[in-house]
Image (cartoon, rainbow, N blue to C red):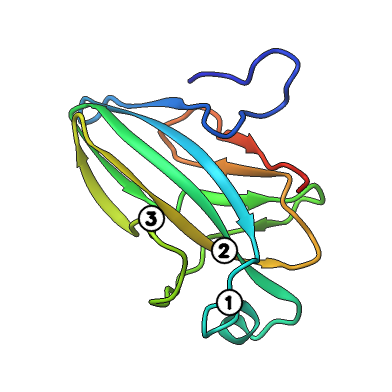
Amino acid sequence: MNSASSGTKYLAFGQAVEVNNPANNSAATTTVLGYQQGGYSPRTSADEAFNTKGYVWATVEIKVCTTKGTVETSRFPWVLAYADGTRVEPSGVTFGDFPKPEYPYEAKVKMGDCVRGKTVFPVPGNQRPERIVYTTELLPTPAEWGVPTR
């Protein structure tokens, strides 16, 4: 796995990690391309979908490119982590008017191909996550990308 450059705590958007799966002899590079909180208004708000108050939709744009064999991807190893220890998982619901392109729930990606898209999270509108965490069991420690304060 690539690590953050010296002096930084987390990976920067666009900085990739190499993920190897010895069980099926495959590998891929994985990165976060961006984070957006609010700024779009699907017909169903995060508060309506989850019976909350003050939540909005946020997106993480992810890109995975297979460098060896065939890899399986999913949106569910991704979480948003807050400074107070709170973690938010991706939304299990999707609506047709969510930001596009949507990252697939699950996909198989062959060598030389990539998958890219946005995963949606319901988040507290008055807070921003500190980092985006990729929690796949294929890495010895989770990969973490820092979220800019604005």
78 lies left or right of 146: left
Mark 2 crowdedness (10 Å alpha carbons): few <14, some 14-19, many ≥20: many
91 lies left or right of 130: left
Mark 3 crowdedness (10 Å alpha carbons): few <14, some 14-19, many ≥20: many
Residue type at mark 3 is Tyr
Residue type at mark 2 is Phe
Q: Which residue is disc 1 drawn over?
A: 41
Q: Secondary structure at mark 1?
A: loop
Q: Mark 3 or mark 2: which comes first in sequence? A: 3
Q: Which residue is disc 2 drawn over?
A: 121
Against 142, is 108 above or below? below
Asked if the residue at tag 2 contacts the one at tag 3, i.e. Cβ–Cβ closer than 8 Å, the answer is no
Against 121, is 49 above or below? below
Q: Mark 1 or mark 3: which comes first in sequence? A: 1
Q: Mark 2 or mark 1: which comes first in sequence? A: 1
User: Which residue is depicted at the point 58% across and 70% down?
Assistant: 40
User: Which residue is depicted at the point 20% across and 29% down?
Assistant: 112
Quadrant housing residue 131:
top right
The label number, if any, that marks residue 122 in the structure image: none
Horizontal and vertical percent position of residue 143 = 55, 33
Label 3, label 2: how many angstroms apart (C-alpha)? 12 Å
Q: Which residue is disc 3 drawn over?
A: 103
